[in-house]
Amino acid sequence: MVDAAPGGIPEEMLEHLGVTYVDEVIISHADRDHIAGLPGVLRGFEVGRVWINADPARSGPAWDAVRAAVRDAATSGRTVVRAEVGAGQEFVSPGGRLLIRVVAPLGADLLFGTGQSIDGGPKLNANGLSAVVGIFVDGECSVLLPGDAGLEAFTSLRDSNQDIRSRVLVFPHHGGRPGQADPVAFASLVAGLVEPEVVIFSVGRNRSGFPRADIVAAVKAARPSTYIGCTQLVEECGHEPAPVHLHELPAQGRRDSGACCLGSVEIDLDTPTRYLPLLGDHAMYVNSLAGSPICRR
């Protein structure tokens, strides 16, 4: 499991899939929307190991709840906690078909930690040390999960000639502004390195400006054949819709508005080019919307 969002969807998804034991939980970084669901997962399921990069600057109720839940799971002996997520770590499924590989951040960068700067650059925050995780099936990367990795991470991957091409890219920063970097240049770099067939923007309907229209346009310019979808129908794409849910998987959009746009996505491991919901069904839904959906501009 990679990241644990708040709201109960991680637990609901595990229950839907019939999962009772989670071998590994990898937390990309310490932002609330990536970590606040971890206490619920630790309470409701057996977890073998949790991997997380420490962030001493964090505080607040959500982070306190995470630390308490992790401490309780570790001291009870139920779960092993590792306070480091960095390039080179790999997790292989029984049989070897599925491989989860961390490709960033570099181990040397982890030595600096949050609040420090590398070579006189800007001070690192949680995003600066966000893990970039690839999910490989039979040796090919099916999904790249970059969390909120920024320009520095992708520049480092480019300069070190890392091959991060993937069929599916969950776009970093939810399609929002990537720190101080130019959004268009950042989107062009990421799309050019990953060469995705499908780009998913994980967003909420009422989160204004996610995804940014200029980032979506830059992805389309860099990869014209790439299919683009958002997990929820954002406000800029149309009026409040009638309830529509394209697939049976649990999704936050079903709770928030009854409509999910693309919603949660399932990838068939036996046929990695097959997605549920079917992209054709999603395209029909988007084309039926009044207004000007961002992905069709």
Image: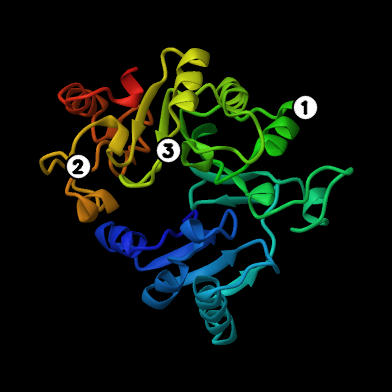
C-alpha span from label 3 to label 2: 26 Å
- Residue 232 position, x and y percent, is 29, 42
Give the quadrant of the C terminus.
Answer: top left
- The numbered disc on residue 159 is 1
The residue at the point 58 percent across, 52 percent down is: 91
Residue to which mark 3 is pinned: 209
Side (left or right) of 114 relative to 20: right
Q: Nearer the viewer, residue 122 or 201?
A: 122
**Picture layout, residue 3 above or below residue 242:** below
**Picture layout, residue 49 above or below residue 174:** below
Label 3 sits on a secondary structure element that is loop
C-alpha span from label 1 to label 3: 30 Å
Label 1 sits on a secondary structure element that is helix
Amino acid of disc 1: Asp
The residue at the point 77 percent across, 58 percent down is: 115
Residue 17 location, quadrant: bottom left
Q: Earlier in the sequence, mark 1 or mark 3?
A: 1
Residue to which mark 2 is pinned: 247
Q: Earlier in the sequence, mark 3 or mark 2?
A: 3
- Residue 247 position, x and y percent, is 19, 42
- Residue 117 position, x and y percent, is 83, 50
